[in-house]
Amino acid sequence: MKISCVIPAFNEAKNIVKVVSDVRPYVAEIIVVDDCSSDNTAQLATAAGATVLRHPINRGQGASLQTGNDYALEHGSDIIIHFDADDQFLASEIPEMAAPIISGQADIVFGSRFLKKKSQLPFLKQQLLLPLARIFNRLFLGLKLSDPQNGFRALNRQAAQAIKISNREMAHATEIQAKAQAAQLKIKEISVTVLYHEFGQKFSGGLKIVKDLLIHKIIK
């Protein structure tokens, strides 16, 4: 069973070597999608042993994930792990993400900061942005998952083929959850650790996610 890890990256020269090195023991292939970085992220990722795909223009994290999914499917991946390039996730938790898929319990597994493990969330995220996002997801999309904006997830081939990510920016996280539910995939949520090295998603960033979701909902 081939497990691949897709890592979208934009100007992550500071972190990318460590992230690729940490992930390498747990997967067969690491696919870094460089989203038109202005630094040497791509070169460092290549030197660290990753397969690097490059966007000629900056397209956003959602588009980078779709590029990585397409490549992974074309190259025989059975399980695709989504993992961030900013060194906030623990690579050692990748086997836990993949386990429910390997055992047949799930088609897609979402990481959550709100279950057993405790992540030190920035105050604004914990008390305002993420609670509002959960309320939005329940009211407008019927989603009951505990973490609406977590980039650590695992998909089997069926899930990756069924979910085409159309939102290029940060609202893609909720889009993936909604499309997984609409496709009647087997969904599981497990606890993951998130380490915040720099605090603060701006409130305006949270509002933009809601705006993107509303536009997507109206259009669709």
Image (spheres, rainbow, N blue to C red):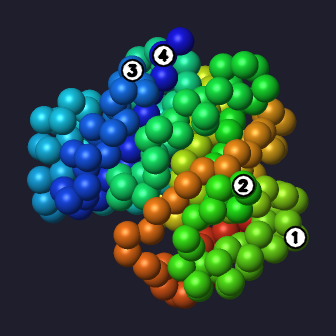
Instruction: Determine whether label 4 and label 2 are within 8 Å by CB.
Output: no
- Residue 116: assigned label: 2
Nearest-to-viewer mark from 4 and 2:
2
SS at badge 4:
loop
Residue 152, relative to residue 163: is it above or below? below
Hey, what amino acid is under mark 2?
A: Lys
The residue beneath circle 4 is 2
SS at badge 2:
loop
The residues bearing labels 4 and 1 have C-alpha atoms spaced at a distance of 37 Å
- In primary-sequence order, the first of circles 4 and 2 is 4
Hey, what amino acid is under mark 1?
A: Leu
Residue 167, relative to residue 6: is it above or below? below
Bin the neighbour count of mark 3 within 10 Å (Cα to Cα): few under 14, some 14-19, many 20 and up.
few
Q: Position of residue 12 (x, y in %)?
A: 25, 58
SS at badge 1:
helix
Bin the neighbour count of mark 4 within 10 Å (Cα to Cα): few under 14, some 14-19, many 20 and up.
few
The residue beneath circle 1 is 139
Hey, what amino acid is under mark 4?
A: Lys
The residues bearing labels 2 and 3 have C-alpha atoms spaced at a distance of 29 Å
The residue beneath circle 3 is 28
Instruction: Determine whether label 4 and label 3 are within 8 Å by CB.
Output: yes
